[in-house]
Image (spheres, helix red, strand yellow):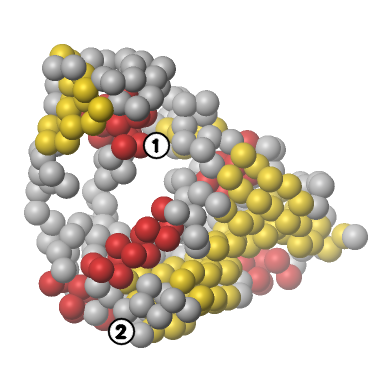
Amino acid sequence: MPSKIEIISDASEVRLDKYVAEKIPDLSRMRVRELIDSGSITVNGKTAKPSYLIKTGDRIVADVPPPPPTVHVAENIPLKIIYEDDSLAVIDKPPGLTTHPAPGHPDGTLLNALLGRYPELSEGGGERPGIVHRLDKDTSGLMVVARSREIQGALSEQFKERQVTKVYLVLVRGKLEPKTGIIEAAIGRSMIDRKKMAVSETGREAKSLYRVIQHFKGYTLLEVRIFTGRTHQIRVHLAAIGFPVIGDQTYGVASEFFPRQFLHSHRLSFTHPKTGNTLSFTSELPPDLSDGLAGLTPIP
């Protein structure tokens, strides 16, 4: 990312922090606010507040300091490979594996495992080599990873343009009806707890489609397709309509039957960047979820 970015506003009546975060996807909204507060983002040559409502034609300049160099360590962490070729791989991520290093979690992640399996990734540089999208630590299932920066960029573009099909298996509390539905509600950082996400009018658009697979006594098993990739999207959307994810201790409810949140990346479909072929994969529920599901009582 260049250190200085100039944007001529093509919108009006939008918060400055929200607009800049949308125009510079590499910066989170929180990071944008930090830069605004420090004076590193100006409007028409002057400092402004994050809540400033931009006007069409405003000249916004972001002076972004370069991030410190990141060195990731290759580790010999076993991975369940579903598909692999010279360009990419599809893995079935186990629960408990974090996607990439973060403060307080510098190693033992999927990224470290990828560097161990594909040493060539370290040559391409970048903050998160190979990582195209992420699953929460306690979410299991299918992920596609890249074996070069070129492929990483091409796959990331497919996700950005919503050309990737992502379907999850989810168990929620209660009897969800009707049997199909669409949840369209913007998601942003919670104003009450900054570690959480929440449905918010000032958030980014988010869309989830659900289909009931089976009702159980006190529970509903769903298939959920997401059309956007907001942080914690499925968990936040389902909690917002009153059907929290079972085992989710952040937005849902703990359960004696399930050791972690019942959220599994079940189906994944995308276009191979080199061949142009459509690749589709399916992953069944792992034992820690299927065993608990078998103990529930089905109802018509």
Q: Residue at x 79, y 61 (%)?
A: 214
The tag earlier along the polypeptide, 1 or 2, is 2
Number of numbered discs visible in the structure rendering: 2
User: From what the image shows, is residue 15 above or below residue 282?
Assistant: above
Q: Residue at x 83, y 63 (%)?
A: 298
Mark 1 vs mark 2, CA separation in Å: 38 Å
User: From what the image shows, is residue 299 above or below residue 267?
Assistant: above
> Along the line of sight, which residue is nearer the eye, 235 or 204?
204
Would residue 143 appear left or right of 297 to someone viewing this image? Answer: left
Q: Is residue 76 visible?
A: no
Q: Residue reaching furthest right?
A: 300
Foreground mark, 1 or 2, reads 2
In this figure, which residue is indicated by the disc labeled 1?
195
User: Residue 201 location in percent, x, y?
Assistant: 52, 26
- Quarter of the picture holding the C terminus: bottom right
Secondary structure found at label 1: loop
Q: What residue type is labelled 1?
A: Lys
User: Residue 71 location in percent, x, y?
Assistant: 12, 61
In this figure, which residue is indicated by the disc labeled 2?
86
Q: Can residue 53 be seen in this view?
A: yes
Give residue 192's quadrant in the image: top left
User: Residue 42 location in percent, x, y?
Assistant: 18, 21
Q: Residue at x 76, y 57 (%)?
A: 212
Would residue 190 appear left or right of 55 to someone viewing this image? Answer: right
User: From what the image shows, is residue 42 above or below residue 32?
Assistant: above
